[in-house]
Structures are given as structure tokens and as C-alpha cells.
Image: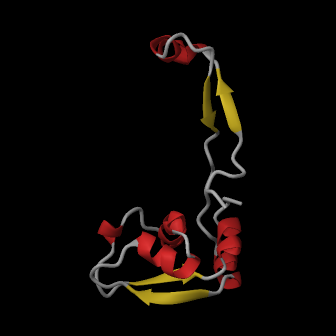
């Protein structure tokens, strides 16, 4: 289930990007994804999600945890977003994070599904 599976694709032909289209061999439009709106899970969303606590240790990475819990490293961002971290640099050994166990429900709570 790709991150952008339900995100609309736009054909951008507005005048603002004319310089870019000319730079790219005079293409007529630029195909791009619409900006996806993500939400922080509400208290109610968090209550409805079963999650597991994980004590962060040296060597942990979001992609490793995604592989362990979801069998897909591409969902590292779900764990990061759910916990409010942009990267692992903001987490220190001993910090406790929550890992939502039901990936589909977590994606719905984040507004990505």
C-alpha cells in the first residue's frame, strides 16, 4: 500500500511554471502529486489504536521498526509521524515511543488513507 496511493495526480500547466517547462524541452505540463494533508492523531484516534511501547535504544531506526512491525520499511514515516518526530536525531536512548500495530487504522488516523 504505497504512501500516495489515494493522492490525486495533477497536470500542472499554470503560467508560473512556464520557465521550468521551457527548461525541460518545452514540455506542455508537469505531472505531480497533489499536496497530501496529514493530521496528528487525536486523543480519540489514539484510544482506538492498539499500540506497543518501544524503548528507544542505540542503533534503532524508524525503518528497522517498520520492517519489524509492518514487514515493510516504507512505512517508517507512520511511526515517526505518530510519535511527532521528523527524524531519529530527535530521539534519545531511553525515550519511549508508541508503535501503532494496526497499520491500516493508523493510516486512517493520520489522514493518509
92 relative to 107 in the view: left or right: left
- 72, above or below 28, in the image: below
30 relative to 44 in the view: left or right: left
Q: Specify the quadrant that holds the N terminus.
A: bottom right
Residue lying at 71% horizontally and 66% vertically, measured from the top left: 108
User: Can you give x and y, in whole percent of width and height, for residue 102 in the image?
Assistant: 66, 79
- 92, above or below 2, in the image: below
Res 104 seen here: yes
- 18, above or below 94, in the image: above
Q: Specify the quadrant that holds the C terminus.
A: bottom right
User: Can you give x and y, in whole percent of width and height, for residue 70 in the image?
Assistant: 58, 76
Q: Say how the picture is coloured.
A: secondary structure
Residue lying at 67% horizontally and 26% vertically, measured from the top left: 11
101 relative to 56 in the view: left or right: right
Residue lying at 55% horizontally and 16% vertically, measured from the top left: 16
**The image quarter in which residue 89 lies:** bottom left
Amino acid at each position: 500500500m504505497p504512501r500516495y496511493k489515494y493522492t490525486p495526480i495533477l497536470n500542472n500547466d499554470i503560467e508560473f511554471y512556464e520557465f521550468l517547462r521551457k527548461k525541460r524541452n518545452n514540455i506542455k505540463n508537469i505531472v505531480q502529486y497533489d499536496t497530501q494533508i496529514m493530521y496528528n492523531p487525536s486523543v480519540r484516534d489514539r484510544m482506538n489504536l492498539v499500540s506497543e511501547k518501544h524503548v528507544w535504544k542505540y542503533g534503532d531506526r524508524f525503518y528497522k521498526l517498520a520492517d519489524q512491525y509492518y514487514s515493510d520499511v516504507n512505512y517508517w514515516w507512520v511511526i515517526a509521524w505518530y510519535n511527532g518526530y521528523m527524524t531519529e536525531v530527535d530521539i534519545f536512548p531511553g525515550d519511549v515511543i508508541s508503535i501503532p500495530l494496526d497499520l491500516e487504522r493508523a493510516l486512517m488516523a493520520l489522514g493518509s488513507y
